Amino acid sequence: EAGVAQSPRYKIIEKRQSVAFWCNPISGHATLYWYQQILGQGPKLLIQFQNNGVVDDSQLPKDRFSAERLKGVDSTLKIQPAKLEDSAVYLCASSLLAAYSNQPQHFGDGTRLSIL
Amino acid sequence: QKEVEQDPGPLSVPEGAIVSLNCTYSNSAFQYFMWYRQYSRKGPELLMYTYSSGNKEDGRFTAQVDKSSKYISLFIRDSQPSDSATYLCAMKEGDGGATNKLIFGTGTLLAVQP
């Protein structure tokens, strides 16, 4: 079974620039998550999609972050404009169905973002 | 107070030692408890998944949950250098909603010396 795919693996930009990350979940997984992991911390949920609808975006800084999951498969996360504190690893995860709480989340290897 | 507290380490042990990793939490609604292993520059990998209180064993790994004390543990027996990684505890509330929101600890960095 292929895992969660993310690209790019690394990105370096200057503050105030924009950046986008891409995620392809495990085939058949209806639920997709974006997490932010700052160095030395655990992942923090930014947004959760069920198919192509948003379930939870309560911790997404909506003035600068946006995410979409058109067609209920791939997803993109965008930051515009980037701030220094956005330097982090952005992890994508997927699970079969969130409503069944025994479904584990499977993570990709993330995109490491550095803001100069 | 953070919802989930985890000693960040680092923890250094000799090969073959028994390792004990721990987390405490404050939200009594948490019912599902997980341990993830994260190698450097990799995503978290699910190691153990338990529901409510009790023990679960999988090979060299044992997960314990004590809901009365709001305390979870992961034990690694006969530790190997390949176990060197960051170990993240994670937990979530029970059924009843569409969200599957995980709350993570900060992670404990483990180094197993050959």
Image (cartoon, rainbow, N blue to C red):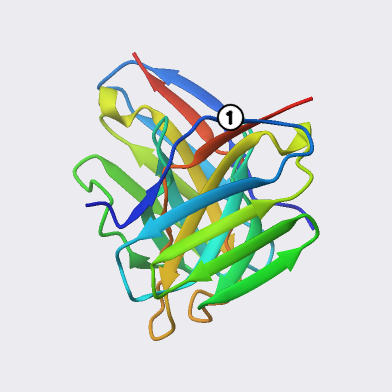
Looking at the rendering, which quadrant does residue A40 occupy?
top left
The N terminus of chain A lies in quadrant: bottom right
Q: Residue furthest bottom?
A: B96
Looking at the rendering, which quadrant does residue B25 occupy?
bottom left
**Left or right: where A56 falls relative to B47:** left
Q: Is residue A3 above or below residue B41?
A: below
* Numbered disc 1: secondary structure: loop
What percent of the width, then of the height, locates residue A24? 61, 51
Which residue corresponds to the image point at 39% horizontal and 75% vertical from the top-left? B68
Residue under label 1:
A9
**Left or right: where A71 falls relative to A4:** left
Using the rendered image of the protein, determine whether residue A74 is visible from the camera's viewpoint. no
Q: Is residue B60 above or below residue A102?
A: above
Q: Residue furthest left?
A: A63
Which residue corresponds to the image point at 75% horizontal and 50% vertical from the top-left? B77
What percent of the width, then of the height, locates residue A91? 50, 44
Name the residue type under label 1.
Arg
Which residue corresponds to the image point at 76% horizontal and 53% vertical from the top-left? A2
Using the rendered image of the protein, determine whether residue A114 is visible from the camera's viewpoint. yes
From the viewer's side, name the closer residue of A92 and A62: A92
From the viewer's side, name the closer residue of B3 and B19: B19
Q: Local crowd at mark 1 within 10 Å, few (<14), some, or many (≥20)?
A: some
Q: Chain of mark 1?
A: A
What percent of the width, then of the height, locates residue A47? 37, 56
From the viewer's side, name the closer residue of B39 and A105: B39
**Left or right: where B64 falls relative to B100:** right
What percent of the width, then of the height, locates residue B78? 79, 45
